[in-house]
Image (cartoon, rainbow, N blue to C red):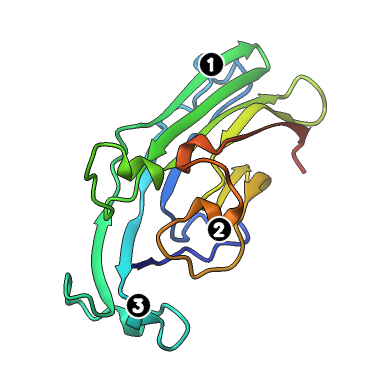
Amino acid sequence: FYYAGDNRSDFDPDGSFRTRQTVIVVPEEASSASGIASGTAPMEETGTTRQYASDALDDHSLNASDDDGVLQDCHLENDVGHASTSDMHIAVTRTSPHSVSAHIYGNASNPLIPDIVGWVRQIFAITWDYTINLDTSTQVTKWSIIEGCHDYFPAFQVYVNGQLIDGYSPGPGPWPDFNPAAFGLPNLGRFNQECVTKRGTLS
């Protein structure tokens, strides 16, 4: 089976996604003691996962004509589902009168892959763990990724105020069920991790 992607490039808050976490933070303690903007709450979301049979690619693309609405028939659109948000987390910590830290982490698996022996679904999971600091103690707002870890697949993007600060793409699809060997990766799913440390300023 094949799964529809999101074809994301530039920042698009209304675009489709597999997983998304959003938090509005306020570095200035005078405006928010907690560091979270008043009247808002962190959000964890998952998008619709769509599974297609191989004949959906007879025209070399997945598009609206493949969404026939008839599920589990091994023809065109075969199944749809939503992943759980139960293992997605956001923790905001005030680190000074002019800075906050957001710990954004989680794990979400493909809801359409059978969990046959308790760990199969985790092979195909999206796993991430980022700690991002924002500091307004100078004339420019500085950001830093204290540590950001991800497991390579699928693509992801990290934005602050609409500015891309980190991301990864495995390249153009379509991709079948994920095969780590196709990317030269030594192990499976969440065990293939890369961690980065970055810093910069918001434009």
Instruction: Note whether residue 21 is visible.
Output: no
Quarter the C terminus occupies? top right
**Amino acid on which the number 3 mark rests in the picture:** Ser
Q: Position of residue 178 (x, y in %)?
A: 44, 56
State the residue at coordinates (59%, 68%): 172
Q: Position of residue 107 (x, y in %)?
A: 40, 36
**Amino acid on which the number 2 mark rests in the picture:** Ala
Q: Earlier in the sequence, mark 1 or mark 2?
A: 1
Do tag 1 and tag 2 residues touch (Cβ < 8 Å)? no
**Amino acid on which the number 1 mark rests in the picture:** Thr
Q: Which residue is mark 3?
A: 54
Instruction: Note whether residue 145 is visible.
Output: yes
State the residue at coordinates (61%, 20%): 100
Q: Which residue is mark 1?
A: 93
In the image, is 159 to the left or to the right of 122?
A: right
In the image, is 189 to the left or to the right of 172?
A: left
Inter-mark Cα distance, 2 to 3: 19 Å
Q: Position of residue 37 (x, y in %)?
A: 49, 28
Q: Earlier in the sequence, mark 3 or mark 1?
A: 3
Vertical side of 107 occupied by 65: above or below = below
Front residue of this view, candidates 183 and 93: 183
State the residue at coordinates (41%, 81%): 57
Q: Position of residue 60 (x, y in %)?
A: 47, 84
Q: Secondary structure at mark 2?
A: helix
Q: Which residue is mark 2?
A: 182
Front residue of this view, candidates 45 and 134: 45
The quadrant holding residue 26 is top right
Inter-mark Cα distance, 3 to 1: 47 Å
State the residue at coordinates (41%, 29%): 89
The quadrant holding residue 40 is top left
